[in-house]
Image (tube, grey):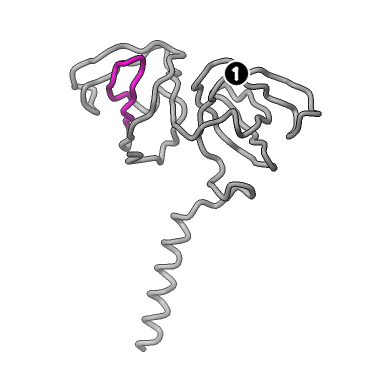
Amino acid sequence: MRILAAVLLIGVAGATLAETVPTTIGPVTHMPLPRFVSLKTEANARRGPGLDHRVDWIFKRRHMPLKVVAEFDNWRKVVDADGTGGWVHYTLLRGARTVVVRAPETMLHELASDNSLPVAVAKQGVIGDLESCKALWCQIDANGYEGWVRKDDIWGVDDTEIDLD
């Protein structure tokens, strides 16, 4: 009976662990896929991973958040908030997290609550540095204004991300 209980306990612990481990790991970086990064500077988004592939897009906004969805050698396949994407050389990306406001405008609050005092209003397209997240809110720094915004109003963070500090 003790052996059966131990086997069941190990099975439950293993199942719990399996749920918390990312299901896809990048073959090059061994980091989770997908994951968010930001753009260092202007970058060509190519049709395939290599300089011989045609440039489909040029990402121009410095620090724009991007989602890495695939890896090959020194190249990362990325998409932006609109779903536009392509292959970008890894040296043009940085691990620092940013978000972009996708709502027409959103209020930055002093605390993570709709009832909290307003700090500033951020318009659609504003990029901010991601500082931390709670279940429904993220703390950002946008153009020197620091405050909490609703996750629904930004792009660059998954719904499940909590406590990024």
State yes or no: residue 143 in magenta. yes
In this rendering, position of residue 68 left or right of residue 130 = right
Which image quadrant is residue 134 in? top left
Residue occupied by mark 1? 42
In x, y percent, where is residue 110? Answer: 21, 22
Residue 95 lies left or right of residue 110; in this view the side is right
Residue 155, given in percent of the width and then of the height, sits at 46, 26
Magenta highlight: main SS: strand
State the image coordinates of residue 1 (x, y, percent, origin top left): 36, 89
Eyeballing the image, is 118 above or below 111? above
> Between residues 128 and 14, which one lies in front from this camera angle?
128
Q: Quadrant of the C terminus?
A: top left
- Give whichever of 10, 120 is nearer the camera: 120
Q: Please report the residue visible at 78 percent of the width from the left and 23 percent of the height from the top.
A: 54
Left-right relation of 45 to 101: right
Q: Is residue 17 above or below residue 32?
A: below
Q: How many labels were placed on the picture? A: 1
The single residue placed furthest to the right in the displayed view is 52
Looking at the rendering, the stretch of residues picked out in magenta corresponds to 136-149
Q: Secondary structure at mark 1?
A: loop
The location of residue 105, given as percent across then percent down, is 38, 12
